[in-house]
Image: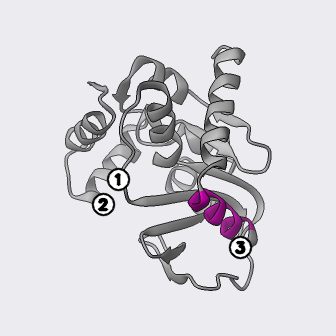
Amino acid sequence: MEPAIQASLRRMLRMYLEQKPNYYRASRLARDNSRGGLWLIGGTVFRTLAHLMYGTPIPKKVDFDFICGGLPENFTCPGWECRLNNYGNPKFIFADESIDLIPINTVSSIKRRKVAPTIENLLDGVPFTIQKIALNCLDWRLVDRGGIQALLNQEVRVNDPDEALILSQMKRLPIFEIMLQLAVELEFNVIK
């Protein structure tokens, strides 16, 4: 990926997120309740970039997925409800916002592939190419393993078939249906 394109997207994403109080609340809560690195992944990253690049709508429901190096013994989350998500990791809920805090060494693709728990290895094992991008919350750096190219191509494609199958089983939907839903929401194309 051209450094100029990545730098431009990083600036756009940072300017957008810095204006969102819900991002500030979420990232503060994640920082207060994590150890080691902290990265924002998933829909908040790729949907926001698609919105900034193409004007695609952003869903009303706010959901933040943070990958972290580790968790403290006790959580600090005044005003938030804390429970466990489907993977046994902490999920913080307040009104229509939810925050998943995921220690990198618990991610299924890291464990399944028996690779070092790095953000690059995590991104290499996500179900779809559109998900292969993360925002380092400590220095605003984008970590890209092909997600920007998927955004530029406006496509949703399987990246890791095994992880796509795991997601399909969890959601009880065929892989193609999940891809189609993403593509429709983003106004992108599905590539088989």
Picture quadrant of residue 25: bottom right
For marks 3 and 2, give the CA distance.
27 Å
Which of marks 2 and 3 precedes in the sequence? 3
Magenta span of residues: 21-31
Q: Is residue 70 left or right of residue 166?
A: right
Q: Residue at coordinates 42% horizontally, 69% vertically from top-left?
A: 96
- Disc 2 marks which residue? 170
Above or below 88: residue 129 = above
- The amino acid type found where label 3 is placed reads Asn
For marks 1 and 3, give the CA distance.
28 Å
Across and down, in percent, residue 158 comes to 36, 33
Number of other residues with Cα within 10 Å of mark 3, as a class: few under 14, some 14 to 19, many 20 or more: some
- The amino acid type found where label 1 is placed reads Ile
Secondary element under disc 3, as helix, strand or loop, is: loop
Secondary element under disc 1, as helix, strand or loop, is: helix
Across and down, in percent, residue 110 comes to 58, 51
- Disc 1 marks which residue? 166
Q: Residue at coordinates 52% horizontally, 58% vertically from top-left?
A: 64
- Disc 3 marks which residue? 33
Q: Is residue 172 magenta?
A: no
Above or below 117: residue 6 = above
Name the quarter where the C terminus is drawn: top left
Q: Is residue 153 left or right of residue 147?
A: left
Q: Residue at coordinates 56% horizontally, 82% vertically from top-left?
A: 80
Majority secondary structure of the magenta segment? helix
Picture quadrant of residue 37: bottom right
